[in-house]
Every structure is written in structure tokens, then in C-alpha cells.
Image: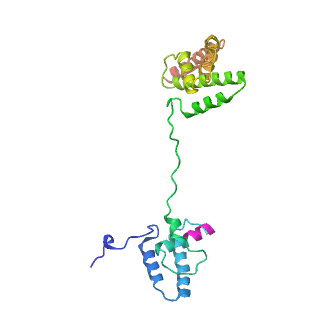
């Protein structure tokens, strides 16, 4: 009669297979403890050969002996090189990670902006605090421009800063608008490159020269 796996005993550790589990069951049936311990050491070597990727290190050796105890359901009594593992420790579930439960006010800005605002509130030097507010405003506009290319008014950014700081951060908006202080850094750098004298003309000249060099060769191939 064929014996199907569906009616056999469940394999505890699949990486070792059913044969090793049967050998562990046979090991537990040996009455002499000394002989049982010797056979257990031989079985551990066999388990190591089944998993050749395992290196001969103390950590791996202990894992193999622990696996032998797990396969036996902690019933085999042997004298091994390592203490018998505790069932409670192996069955202990890891503690749940603590996640932040407080909601982010503006998800498109993220939590880092809120942390920057909290840090700016603690600054006592007026100039440092003003510089921090300007930096936050630049970041806010940068984030907005990443998904919305429409022009965002500085007053909107200012209102967001006031809301996040619970009205604890303030800045002279006339100064911000006059100096265009909330404009993103990336946009300023792009404008500087575009406004560099002769930069665009030099690039155009190089492109025309490259095309002129290529065209004669292209005609000769024809």
C-alpha cells in the first residue's frame, strides 16, 4: 500500500526533510543515553552535509543542535556541546514595533518639515529663526513644485508655516516678497545658468559645428 505524505506526520523543519525527522525519532528510542548522544553527534554532521552552505562556525553548530531538539519536539535527552534550548524562548513572539500614531498635518510636506518647524520654534536668536523660516519656505515650495507647476503664492506657504507652528513662527512677508526669499534653491540655480552671459549662444554654436562636421561625411557615404 502506498503511503502518501498527506497521511504522514508533519515535517517540523522542511530544510532537513522527512528522513532526518525519522532518524531523530529513532534516536529518541535508543535507551542508552551515551550511545544516544554519540548517534546525535553523527546525525548533526549529516544535517550539516544536507545544508553545505553552512560554515563550520560555533553559531552554525549551535543552530544544528538546536534544530535537532526542535525536530524531536524537545523530547530527546542527550549530552550535547550546547545547552538544550528553551521551548518558551523559541515560541516567544517578537514584540510589536511602535509606530507613530499622530497624524501628519500636511502629508505632501511629510514629517521632516514638521520636525524642522519644531526646531525653528526653539531658536532664540531672531536672525537664526528667520533663516530657518526662509529655509522651510524654500523646502515647502520645492515639494509643491514637484507635483504642481503652477505658481504658488508666498502667502500660502506662510500660512502653512503659521499653522504648523501654531502661530509661533512669524516673518516679515514684505521682506520675503521683495527678496523672493521663498523661491526653491533648484529654481534659482536653473535661472542662474540660463542667465549666464553667452551660455546659450556657445551651446548653439557647438551644436551647429557638430552638425556641419557630420553632414559632409554623411554625403560622402552616399
Colour scheme used in the picture? rainbow
**Residue 157 on image: x %, y %:** 55, 20
**Residue sitting nearer the eye, 86 or 185:** 86
Magenta-drawn stretch contains 189 = no
**Residue sitting nearer the eye, 95 or 144:** 95
Query: Image quarter for residue 186?
Result: top right
Q: How many marks?
A: 0
**Residue 14 versus residue 3 in the image, above or below:** above
Instruction: Specify whether residue 44 is in view.
Output: yes
Q: Residue at x 52, y 81 (%)?
A: 77
**Residue sitting nearer the eye, 39 or 162:** 162
Q: Residue at x 64, y 28 (%)?
A: 121
Instruction: Specify whether residue 57 is in view.
Output: no
**Residue 211 on image: x %, y %:** 55, 18
Image quadrant holding the N terminus, namely bottom left
**Residue 192 on image: x %, y %:** 64, 16
Relative side of 17 to 61, left or right = left
Point out the stretch of residues depicted in magenta. 57-63
Q: Residue at x 53, y 29 (%)?
A: 109
Q: Residue furthest left?
A: 1
Q: Which is the main secondary structure of the residues drawn in magenta?
A: helix
Amino acid at each position: 500500500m502506498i503511503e502518501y505524505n498527506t497521511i504522514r506526520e508533519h515535517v517540523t523543519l522542511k530544510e532537513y526533510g522527512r528522513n532526518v525527522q525519522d532518524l531523530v525519532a529513532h534516536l529518541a528510542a535508543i535507551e542508552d543515553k551515551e550511545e544516544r548522544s554519540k548517534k546525535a553527534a553523527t546525525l548533526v554532521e549529516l544535517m550539516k552535509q544536507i545544508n553545505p552552505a553552512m560554515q563550520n562556525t560555533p553559531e552554525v553548530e549551535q543552530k544544528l543542535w538546536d534544530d535537532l531538539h526542535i525536530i524531536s519536539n524537545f523530547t530527546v535527552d542527550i549530552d550535547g556541546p550546547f545547552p538544550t534550548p528553551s521551548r518558551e524562548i523559541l515560541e516567544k513572539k517578537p514584540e510589536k514595533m511602535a509606530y507613530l500614531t499622530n497624524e501628519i498635518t500636511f502629508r505632501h510636506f511629510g514629517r521632516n518639515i514638521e520636525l524642522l518647524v519644531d526646531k525653528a520654534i526653539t531658536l532664540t536668536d531672531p536672525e537664526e529663526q528667520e533663516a530657518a523660516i526662509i529655509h522651510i519656505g524654500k523646502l515647502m515650495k520645492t515639494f509643491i513644485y514637484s507635483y504642481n507647476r503652477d505658481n504658488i503664492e508666498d502667502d500660502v506657504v506662510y500660512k502653512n508655516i503659521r499653522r504648523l507652528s501654531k502661530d509661533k513662527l512669524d516673518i516679515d512677508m514684505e521682506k520675503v516678497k521683495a527678496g523672493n526669499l521663498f523661491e526653491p534653491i533648484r529654481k534659482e540655480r536653473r535661472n542662474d545658468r540660463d542667465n549666464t552671459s553667452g551660455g546659450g549662444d556657445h551651446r548653439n554654436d557647438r551644436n551647429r559645428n557638430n552638425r556641419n562636421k557630420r553632414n559632409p561625411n554623411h554625403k560622402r557615404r552616399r
